[in-house]
Amino acid sequence: MDDVIETLEATADDLGALAALNAEVQNLHVNAMPWRFKPPDLEAIRACFGEWMADENICFVLAKVGGDVAGYTVLKIRHRPEHPFCYEQQSLEVDHIGVAESFRGHGVGKALIDDAKTRAGDLGIDRLELTVWGFNQNAQDFFSAQGFQPAMHSMSMTV
């Protein structure tokens, strides 16, 4: 694939494409943890994303290759006030990232992370953060290759 990868802010007109991309990622989660994750409901996803778009601290970014929608991110500005245990912190969280299966391994995910870095810099934010599920080794490897490092581990157990 030699096409240029374009990243641009998504609008309400893109909700259908965003929901479809999310459904691919959601199915990976459902297959790994069906007791936690719901099967994708495109209308519910569209409605949720539509509500999120109204929040000035949330940005949706589409990646397009040759005019085709190839991936997306949901970026959230996170502000944590200072308290006795931690300093005030601000970060840009990569809350969602998804690349259509047909575009995986072609630089789309990297383009989305690069876009997030640029947006963070434009906002005066010097930290990108994200969470990744323990079952998703492919995502962990990808994020490590992009320069992310583990910051904490969340653990659970069934009782």
Image: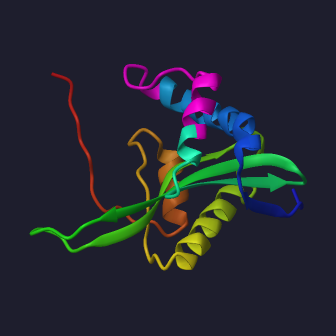
Residue 104 in sight from this viewpoint = no
| Extreme residue in the left direction | 84
Left-right relation of 79 to 142: left
Vertical position of residue 41 compared to residue 96: above or below: above
Left-right relation of 139 to 20: left
Q: Nearer the viewer, residue 59 or 55?
A: 55
Which quarter of the figure is the N terminus placed in?
bottom right
The spot of residue 8 in percent (x, y) is 74, 60
Is 33 covered by the magenta stretch?
yes
Which residue: 76% across, 47% down? 70
Q: Nearer the viewer, residue 67 or 47?
A: 47
Which color scheme did the rendering employ for the protein? rainbow
The spot of residue 22 in percent (x, y) is 62, 36
Quadrant housing residue 65: bottom right
Which quarter of the figure is the C terminus placed in?
top left
Q: Magenta stretch: give its range.
A: 32-50
Is 40 covered by the magenta stretch?
yes
Q: Nearer the viewer, residue 62 or 5?
A: 62
Which residue: 55% across, 56% down? 142
The spot of residue 77 in percent (x, y) is 45, 61
Total residue callouts: 0
Left-right relation of 41 to 132: right
Residue 55 in sight from this viewpoint = yes
Which residue: 23% across, 35% down? 156
Quadrant housing residue 130: bottom left
Which residue: 72% across, 60% down? 107
The spot of residue 71 in percent (x, y) is 70, 48
